[in-house]
Amino acid sequence: MIPIAICDDELLHARQTQAAIRRCEAQAVTRCFETPLALLAAVTQQGYAPRVAVLDIRMAGMDGIELAKRLNALVPGCAVIFLTAYLSYAPDVYETRHVYFVLKSELDRRIGSALRAALAETASLQLATAHGYRNVPVTDVLFLERILRKTRVVLTDGEELVTAAPAALLEAVPDGVFLRCHQSYWANYSHITAMEKDEFVLTGGLRVPISRSYRSAARSAFFANLRGEEG
């Protein structure tokens, strides 16, 4: 299950956000907070540790940006999504670490992409390597390649060879983060810079093949994700 905190001092908007999240993420366990202080109290006094926090920016007293700064310090592994009715707040969100900015008017259209980004930001692969166990953030993984009974995990800083199958490695990773483009290849969408006829071009110029049998599905997933990002 995925604990998700929602903080909005307008209860109706909080409930709308809660419903939108539940429609696109079946594993979400949401908690609504009407004030930043209530959310901070749950974290500091009850041990509440949300994996994702969806924060309204404009709230009485402490605003969402200040709340995000405090959450960054208290729960470093929590990904922040800012939610607001005012586009003018967009430049201000860069004062603190966050993964997405969503206008309330675009909530239903954008929350799915925002959650995928947030969950990818906080997800990791558990790799049993020849040197011991290694916990690797999904954001550091470029692609997976299955070679006979081994999986080659290509990272931004090198690679690892493990026995676990890609399906097992990706079990806890949200759908849509990796695109299967070949019988033996899974590419991390966030590192795809271009799609050519028979290849994905990745960060650093690396290329992974797209096989004929996966071309249609890979193309559809690539452009569906692209439309979601552009909103």
Image (cartoon, grey):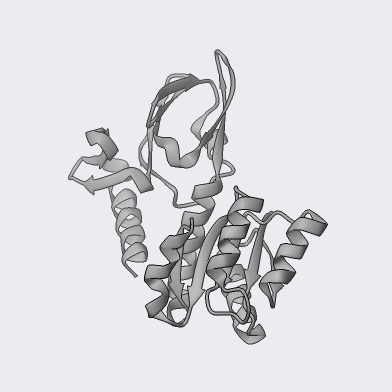
Q: Is residue 208 above or below residue 164?
A: below
Q: Identify the residue shown where x is 78% and y is 53%.
A: 47
Q: Identify the residue shown where x is 63% and y is 72%.
A: 7
Q: Is residue 99 above or below residue 126?
A: below
Q: Which residue is nearer to you in this view: 8 or 177?
A: 8
Q: Residue furthest front?
A: 61
Q: Which residue is nearer to you in this view: 96 or 230?
A: 96
Q: Which residue is nearer to you in this view: 18 or 184?
A: 18
Q: How many marks?
A: 0
Q: Quadrant of residue 129?
A: top right
Quadrant into which the N terminus falls: bottom right
Q: Identify the residue shown where x is 34% and y is 70%.
A: 231
Q: Residue furthest left?
A: 197
Q: Residue furthest top?
A: 130
Q: At which x and y percent is residue 135?
A: 57, 31
Q: Taking 120 as reference, is 181 left or right?
A: left
Q: At which x and y percent is residue 42?
A: 77, 62
Whether residue 210 can be seen here: no
Q: Residue furthest right?
A: 46
Whether residue 223 can be seen here: yes
Q: At which x and y percent is residue 73?
A: 61, 51
Q: At which x and y percent is residue 113?
A: 44, 62
Q: Taking 220 as reference, is 104 left or right?
A: right
Q: Taking 226 as reference, is 96 left or right?
A: right
Q: Identify the residue shown where x is 63% and y is 70%.
A: 6
